[in-house]
Amino acid sequence: MDKIRTDALSERLLRSLAGRTSRRGMLARLGAALVAAPAFPLLPVSRAEAAKDRTAQGLTDFARHAQSKDDTNCDYWRYCAIDGSLCSCCGGGLHTCPPGTEPSPTSWVGTCINPDDGVAYLIAYRDCCGTAMCGQCGCDNTDRESQIYRPQANNDIYWCFGTASMEYHCSTAVLVGVAQ
């Protein structure tokens, strides 16, 4: 008995819908939905949800293996987005350039997680320029690297702009503060 009522109700609803809409109108709505569907992942809400999922899933591969003891190794936690020779292996330090070089006034940034406290920090990577490339402790970490259309967060550019010499020597990793 319920099946007969359900069928009758469904038939009435569909006939009512058919009486109020045209085939062209329905096809136009369906076409618009198909054209707009690929744009939904680009909406900020979708990206915010994806970021929550990444956090919920856990750490990136680099963050899972990062250490906080030896700043001359590429897996040191501040080096999550560094590309080049480490100044800590070339006569400088985490945030100081070696003698005879000068820091670039420009930098790229990364967000790295400290394994000791689990907090994400904003790190500014600054190239030291003025002498030949150090060539020691070469790292190419791309954790959360941005596309080239966002150059301030991309590590594939020599950042010796604004220095006396465009000759690259090594890179530093300056802690800016807690990432928001």
Image (cartoon, grey):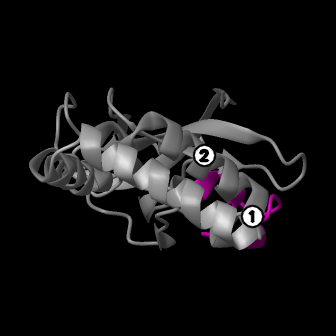
Q: Which element type, helix, strand or loop, lies under badge 1?
A: helix
Tell me residue 54's x, y (percent).
66, 57
Locate the N terminus and report the quarter of the image it occupies: bottom right
Left or right, 138 with respect to 168, comes to right
Locate residue 139, reporting x and y percent: 48, 70
Residue drawn at x 37%, y 44% is: 16
Who is closer to the viewer here, 158 or 118?
Answer: 118
Who is closer to the viewer here, 11 or 63? 11
Can you identify the residue that label 1 sits on?
Answer: 57
**Which residue is pictured at 36% across the width and 52% down the height?**
15
Read off the magenta span.
64-79
How busy is the neighbourhood of tag 1: few (under 14 within 10 Å), some, or many (20 plus)? few
Q: Work out which quarter of the rendered image holds the C terminus and state it.
A: top right
Q: Could you tell which of marks 2 and 1 lies nearer the N-terminus?
A: 2
Q: Amino acid at mark 1?
A: Gln
- Along the viewing direction, whichever of 143 and 19 lies nearer the viewer: 19
Is 8 displayed left or right of 128 in the figure? right
Is 38 placed above or below 52 here? below
Can you see residue 154? no
**Relative side of 160 to 79, left or right:** left
Which secondary structure dominates the residues rendered in magenta? loop
